[in-house]
Image (tube, rainbow, N blue to C red):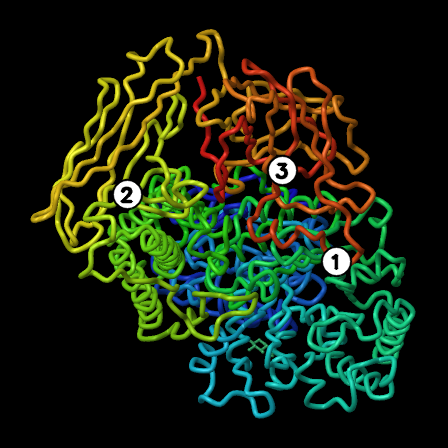
Amino acid sequence: MLGRWVSLSVGLLAFSGSALAIGQATCVSFSQSSSTFPIVSNGVATPILLSEDEWGGVQRAAGDFAMDIHRVTGVMPSLLNVTQSNSSLAGTQAIIVGTLGQSSLIGEVVNNTGLNVSSVEGHWEAFMTREVSNPLPGISSAYVMIGADKRGTIYAMYDHSEQIGVSPWYWWADVPVKTNSEIYAASSGCAHGSPTVQYRGIFLNDEAPALTDWAMVRFTNGTGAPLTGSPFNHYFYTSLFELMLRMKANYLWPAMWASAFGVDDLLNQPLANWYGIVMGTSHEEPIMRSIPVEWDLFGIGPWDYSTNKEHIYPFWVEGAERGAPYENMFTVGMRGDGDEPLSGGQDIQLLEQIISDQRTILSDTFPGVNVTTIPQMWCLYKEVLGYYEDGMTVPDDIALLWTDDNYGNIERLPLVSERTRTGGAGVYYHYDYVGSPRNYKWIVSSQLAKTYEQMSLATARNATRIWIVNVGDLKPYEMETEFFITYGWDTSLWNYDNLDSFVTAWAQREFSLSSEDATTVAGIIANVTRFNSNCKPELLNATTFSLTNYREAQNMLAMWEATNASATAIQAKLPESVLPAYFQLVYHPVQVSYTLANMWIAAGMNNLRASQAFLSANYYADLVENLFEQDWNLEVEYDSQLDGKWAHMMSQTHTLYVYWQEPYSNAMPPVSWQQPYKQALAGAMRLAIEDSEGAWPGDNQYDCAAGYSCPNPTVTIDPYVPEGNRYFIVGAGGPAPFNWTATTNVSWLILSPSSGYVTPNAPEQYVYASVDWTQLENTTSVTAFVNFNATAANQPMMSQQVYFTANYTAAPSNFTGFVEGDGTVSMEAIHAARNTSVDGITWTELPGYGRTLSAVTPWPRGGDELNFTVGTGPSIEYDFYTFNTIGDGGNISVTAYVSPSLNSLGPDRPLAIGMQVDSDEPQVSYYVPNATPGSLPDAWNQWASENIITVPMNFTADPGAHTLTVWMIEPTVVLQKIVIDTGGVLPSYLGPPESIRV
Ligand SMILES: *[C@@H]1O[C@H](CO)[C@@H](O)[C@H](O)[C@H]1NC(C)=O
């Protein structure tokens, strides 16, 4: 039943004038043909007919639909309630909107035309539209829009709204409406069956300061609700409900930090129902009451069922009765106070009693209704999962809501034995989080490819009754939220290899870009989300990226700079009307993320240079200050756009976290200053080298083990060092400007530049050293000198000598594959030599996924039963050539970089990967140890923070050509990169850069 009418027209057609809609069939055009029906033609809008007995929510949405037609064409269609007997009032053509079983008008139309509605009838949220002849007396032709139920009809209209040029985000992200003077619908219409995921929802959470302060200004007179101070009243919610329905979401967990949906504004609940939004409450808020807010206001005694059932039971009765008139999904179960475990430890019996009592309450509240038909959900969050794993059972009709680890990795999914539950299963996912190891609630930091990979797993494991994502303040997760909902709407449309088309279609819809520019924007989005998910901005510190090894920090900065430059170039092309949307959705996230990353790296360079007695420490300190200022300026820029429409929305603090909880103000990273008047003890010139934190001349703890009287520095290089050269940094050690030269005693060493002038205003200079290897063929190791000489006025000439060792290596000419350089072989997972399928399963690329390039995973994933013993499953092979072994001892270590997925197939099927070098015995690692049910493995904090798990194995392999084989053991293993250490691997965040391939 998944999207079976959709002819896979994902995205949009790439020529202008076409309809702009994502993940849906296209049935709108802007010019007439013999197979179109006029919506607006020749300045005349076809009237829209409804029935008086139609759902209020459909009546309301029809008003939006008419308004959308007006927004696009400037012509307002009339909206009429008609009956069979007065339908001719409308004229000879009409758009007829109605819900099967509700609208008597649509019943008559179906009757009169003999229209076959079996594909819609009885199918949750399904709809169909098409042109029919003689539907009603006096009307010769009509475009009917028929929903199976209230939301089916609403979605039919909003589906068309998006196609005619009104983005779901027209208000929430200021996306301009694309105007056209005429609109036509294809006579054959559009249709969609039941969505894959029945309840597609968002959770407004961790909603202060940003969303709360913004809503306070926008929707209240500055005071908020009487009892709670909450700004989330019906003005706020009606605009949110509209957005949700336009996106085809249907389920909401309302803001709950200092808010109580049912109390703050008595219109909230009835309005949700009228709009057609199914209300729920979060995992810790049973029976439609906000916890702890409502309990603190109205509860008596402790929030502890074992001692205070007397007061908690009637509290829930009130929640059930208050919600009874409306469409809800009742959360059942209970957590302790403050989103903590229940007091008294793992008391399964107590929790079973609680749920049984809650069912009694529901039965009493809905007399005559079978309790198993009332939508209920039990969320297996944190310790609650432990109760379940320890054998707690709940009635079959309650949906089990599985969760991620708060960092986007689903902890557990339904096993085969759990898939027949009538209540089904779902997933609670996070784009935003407050808790350990660290909050992330400022800026987008989730990769689309990762979300897809995890939620496709949920789809394959039948966890499709409920999908709900924690969206924090909602902005700035606009696109990611729409993707989550759109994917759940029809999972059959999206695959690992067409996710980019979601982003390009989105960019074209929001910014009216050419397909080329849309592709650029997709690249920008891919970069921002990759960089921010590699290390959440909240987790960045001054040494996250290595400042000395692999040019890691410099490369990060260069990538940020390029991303920022292309975001700026796109911005420069855009018409004024598109700028606010582009700023909110693309430019601001890029700018603030780049600024923050740059600030942290500059802080690291400041600290490093200060420890090296480089005056350039002060340059970096200034840079940190400027970027810290820039960070504020960007917040002001966000606040001041559109006369303050979004003021406070980016007010989340985000610098200098010291523990998991947010800092209460933004503070600048610590920097230090060199006295600019005083020269370093060793003289005017300072020298530093790549791969070292040391500095010369003089003593430094990193110059050698003793830290004093160290030898001259040595730099080594070989032909397969990926960077192709090495650098030195010549820097000022004080106020005296100096001329410097770099000279060498050999002809094969090229220094660039080989002389220069360093002053306090240009306090450091990089000198690159490369080698003419043709002169060194058939040597092994040759060492040259480089002499750095400096002359400053009124000071004796000073000099520092450096040893430069060139290790000549060469892979045989008939070898193809990766070649060791710098004591390392680093390989992106997709760059394999051979890939062997077994049972139709192949290690397949997930483009764009992960920290550096992409990832591979066994695909299709196969059923749950499908796993292999090492050596029998799908394999992927990498050819590599080595010259060294660790300590010349014949050993190498091979480290697989895998995604921090968890044992979602259950404790009996832990994730595992096999690796083998040549024909040696393969090794297997079960790298995610099973933790006590309800908790996470000890190493999880690190995995989640670094967004990677490293799986090392040791092998014996003499220098020469080798093959590494990676074996599938279990599905859902996601391999990003492999690093082989032959003795040279240095510390870094992302691992060594990819080696040279010949
Ligand atoms: C149609 O009738 C309903 C129910 O009385 C009413 O709420 C709605 O405003 C009417 N719509 C129009 C366009 O008159």
Q: Are marks 1 and 2 in contact (CB under 8 Å)?
A: no
Q: 65 or 390: nearer the eye?
A: 390
- Would you name the residue on which mark 2 appears? 697
Q: Are marks 3 and 1 in contact (CB under 8 Å)?
A: no
- Would you name the residue on which mark 1 appears? 935
x%, y% of residue 26? Answer: 50, 46
| Disc 1: CA contacts within 10 A as few (<14), some (14-19) or many (>=20) | some
Which numbered mark, 3 or 1, is in the foreground of this view?
1
Among the two numbered marks 3 and 1 on one chain, the one whose residue lies closer to the N terminus:
1
Q: How many marks?
A: 3
- The answer to whether residue 396 is visible is yes
Q: Is residue 16 above or below residue 325?
A: above
In the rendered structure, find residue 974 and report the number of the disc placed on it. Answer: 3
- The answer to whether residue 178 is visible is no
> Which amino acid lies under the numbered mark 1 shown in the image of this protein?
Ser
The residue tagged with tag 1: helix, strand or loop?
Answer: loop
Which numbered mark, 3 or 2, is in the foreground of this view?
2
The residue tagged with tag 2: helix, strand or loop?
Answer: loop
Among the two numbered marks 3 and 2 on one chain, the one whose residue lies closer to the N terminus:
2
Q: Judge from the rendering whether residue 504 lies leftward or rightward of residue 279; answer left or right.
A: left
x%, y% of residue 783? Answer: 33, 21
| Disc 2: CA contacts within 10 A as few (<14), some (14-19) or many (>=20) | many
Q: Quadrant of residue 392?
A: bottom right
